[in-house]
Amino acid sequence: MQKDTLSYDSLDSRPLPKWLIDQKSGVTSFQPEEIVMKEDHSLEISFIVTGVFIILLAAFITLYLNKKHKNQVS
Amino acid sequence: MKRKFFTIILLAALISLACTTRVSEWVLLNARPNQYTLVYFHNGSVSESVKKQNQKLAEGISSSNIQFKTVSRQGIAEPYYGLYYEGRFFSKYKTVDDLRGLTSSPLREKVAAELMAGKLCVMLYLKTDNKEKDEKGLSTLRSTIESSPFGKIITVLELSRNNSEEHHFASLLLNVEDDLKDIQEPMLFGIFGRFKALEPLLGRGISEENINLMIDYFTAECSCLIKDDLPGTDILSLDQWENPQTALLNRIIDDNPTLGY
C-alpha cells in the first residue's frame, strides 16, 4: 500500500486504496477455467480398434489351425 | 524410494491445502503482526526513577506487538515518547501516563475475540459524531451486511473518533494512512487476521459495491499475489493469537460452493 499522502483537491479525487483497485480490476481473484465442449471420437476409435483386433486374431487362429491340420494330414 | 514418494505426496497435499485457504483464515493462521517501536527520546541524562519507570513500562507492553527503545538525541527541550510503525511516526506522548491503555482496550479485546471465534472479519465503523454523516454510511453498511451471504460471520462495531476510553485505538486507526486524521468523514475499516486493518472506505466510498468488494477480498482464495503483498496496518494489540476457532467461512462455502468463486 502507498503510505505517502498524495496531493488531491477534494475527497472525491483522493486515490482509492490499492486493495480496492485490485478488487475492482479482479487482479486478486481467480478466473474459473472456461469449459469448452469438444467432439469426442474415442468411442468410435475404440470400436474400430476392437473390431480390427478381433478380425486379425480370428485370421491368425484360422491360419494357425489350417496349417496344423495340413501337417497332421500329410 | 518409498520415503521420497511419501514426501512428494505429503508436500502436494499441503500445497493444495494452502491454495484453497481463504485470505481471512490464512492471514489469521500465518501472518505475524508487524512490530511497533516505542522510543523514549531524552537529551543525555536519564534519572534512576525514569529508568525504573521505563523498565516497568517495557515489561507492561512486552506481551504486545511492540518493542521499547531509549534514544539519546541532542537539542530536545523535554524528553518524550514517540510511537513508530514500520519507520512511520504515529504519535508523540509527553508522559508515561499518556501511554496508559496503549496496547489494550475493551473494544480491541472484543475485536480480537471475534476474530479468534472464527468470524470472517470485523467491520469497524469510525464515527465523526456528525449524526447526519454517520447515519448515512451506517445504514448502507447495515443493509449491505444483511443482504450478504456472509453477513452472519461479519461483526459490525461502531466507535467514535472522540471516544476517550478508546482514544489510542482511534488514533492507531487514523494512522493507517497519513491523511486520515485530517478527513472529517465516517470511515469503515475491515479488520481481519491478527488485527490487521485495511485502508478504510470513507465518506461516499462507503457504498454497497465497495463493501461487497471488501467482503470479496476476505473470502478470496489466498493466492501468492495476496500473500506477498498484504495490504493494511497491524493494530497494536495483545499477543493472543494461539489456537483460533475454525473459520466459519468454510462451512458456508462447503454448503454453497458457488459462493467460493
Image (tube, helix red, strand yellow):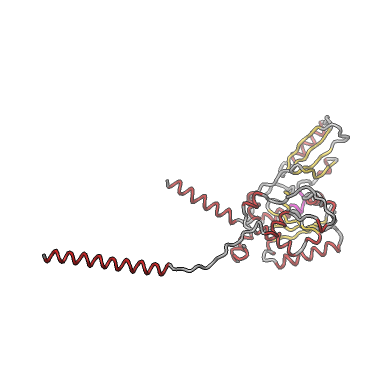
Residue B103 in view of the camera: yes
Q: Which residues are magenta?
A: B104-109
Residue B30 vertical position relative to residue A65 in the rendered view, above or below: above
Residue B3 falls left or right of residue B216: left
| Membership of B157 in magenta stretch | no
User: Looking at the image, which residue sits at the far right?
Assistant: B77
**What x and y, as percent, mark residue A73?**
12, 66
Residue at (77%, 52%) from the top-left corner? B106
Residue B6 falls left or right of residue B25: left
**What x and y, as percent, mark residue B261?**
62, 62
Residue B61 vertical position relative to residue B243 in the rendered view, above or below: above
Residue at (59%, 62%) from the top-left corner? A32
Residue at (75%, 52%) from the top-left corner? B108
Residue B261 vertical position relative to residue B61 in the rendered view, above or below: below
Tag count: 0
Q: Nearer the viewer, residue B125 or B20?
A: B20
**What x and y, as percent, mark residue B213?**
70, 61
User: Looking at the image, which residue sits at the far top?
Assistant: B45
Q: Nearer the viewer, residue B166 or A74?
A: A74
